[in-house]
Image: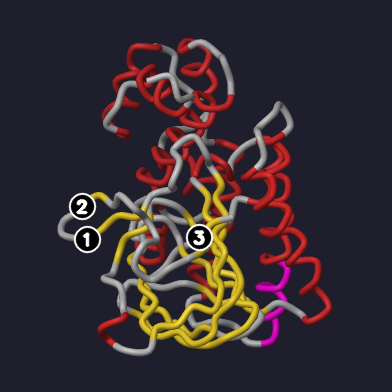
Amino acid sequence: MSVLRTDTIDPEPAEDGGLRVDRLADPDDAIEVVSIDGLQVCTDEETREPHRHDYHELIWARTGEGHHLLDGHEVPVEPLTFTLIGRGQVHVFERARGITGAAIRFSDEVVHGGPMARTDPSWLLVGGGGRVVHVPEDAIDAVDAIVASLAAEGTREPDECSADLQRNLLSVLLLWIERWYDAERAEQCPADDEALQLYRRFTRVLEHDFAAHHDAAHYADALAVPPATLSHTLAQVSGRSTKEHVTDRVMTEASRLLRYTDRTMGEIAYLTGFSDPLYFSRAFKRQEGIAPSAYRERVKGRA
């Protein structure tokens, strides 16, 4: 398990409109655990430049204090908390003192389908800044054990059980975080709760229907809200329209099948709601910037 530093979180960042883009260290790994061991950021000179995440991240702060900037919003770092940072958000540790714990990073495709279908965390990973979820004291040892197990699975030689074990361990962690978030919400309703709960209901309908329904109107009907209201609310919460969410989910499923299975392009097209494999291939390349066959070669390490 590598150690988080303020200057070398990603050894080869890309550029994104002037922003550094942090990516998972190994494109073949969909989950990565990075140890945080006494992180200190005390002056402006020690603050790393803001960077955009190309992955979701859970920051487990076991001890220490400070604050992040997430999409320009100051978010506190407190002991015994998880900070949830969604893919695409701009992040920087602006101040930190004695922070220990870990950063758990994972791609979109690892949280959909299979054992992860129930624990899609996207409704918690949206908005103008990260959410901070407090961990009950009686759960600290269990969290440490899950994080340590995830880290150990990431360093051992992979076998046929590795991917499922990692996804199931992450699933447990995300379900706990959802439980703790809901317990806090019951005590003090956040200002954006109404919009967030519609987004939450949408993600659950989307998870069930994305392959059969690529049209935005279906989701508005299923949620009994006008299409414009749904799209406006989703854009308010996440910055993306209904159609963009549907397309993202479909292509995330395609990426997952390309990475984790040996299904043919025709089978993957069918499973993601395309009757024509050629149209699927074009849509995937338009969305991801790479043909599905080339994507499979890259993530399976054969390129």
Q: Is residue 11 above or below residue 211?
A: below
Q: Which residue is painted at 59% across and 55% down in the image?
A: 1
Q: Nearer the viewer, residue 2 or 181?
A: 2
- Residue 15's tag is 2
Residue density around tag 3, few if under 14, some if 14–19, many if 20 or more, within 10 Å: many
Q: CA distance from mark 2 to mark 1?
A: 6 Å
Q: Which residue is mark 1?
A: 19
Is the Cβ of the residue at disc 3 closer than 8 Å to that at disc 2?
no
Residue bounds of the magenta highlight: 179-187
Q: Which residue is mark 3?
A: 57
Count of numbered marks: 3
**SS assignment at label 3:** strand
Q: CA distance from mark 3 to mark 2?
A: 19 Å
Q: Nearer the viewer, residue 194 or 46?
A: 46
The answer to whether one can see residue 178 in this image is yes
Residue type at the position of mark 2: Glu
* Quadrant of residue 217 within the rendered picture: top left
Is the Cβ of the residue at disc 2 closer than 8 Å to that at disc 1?
yes
* Quadrant of residue 239 within the rendered picture: bottom left
Q: CA distance from mark 3 to mark 1?
A: 18 Å
Majority secondary structure of the magenta segment? helix
Residue furthest to the left in view is: 18
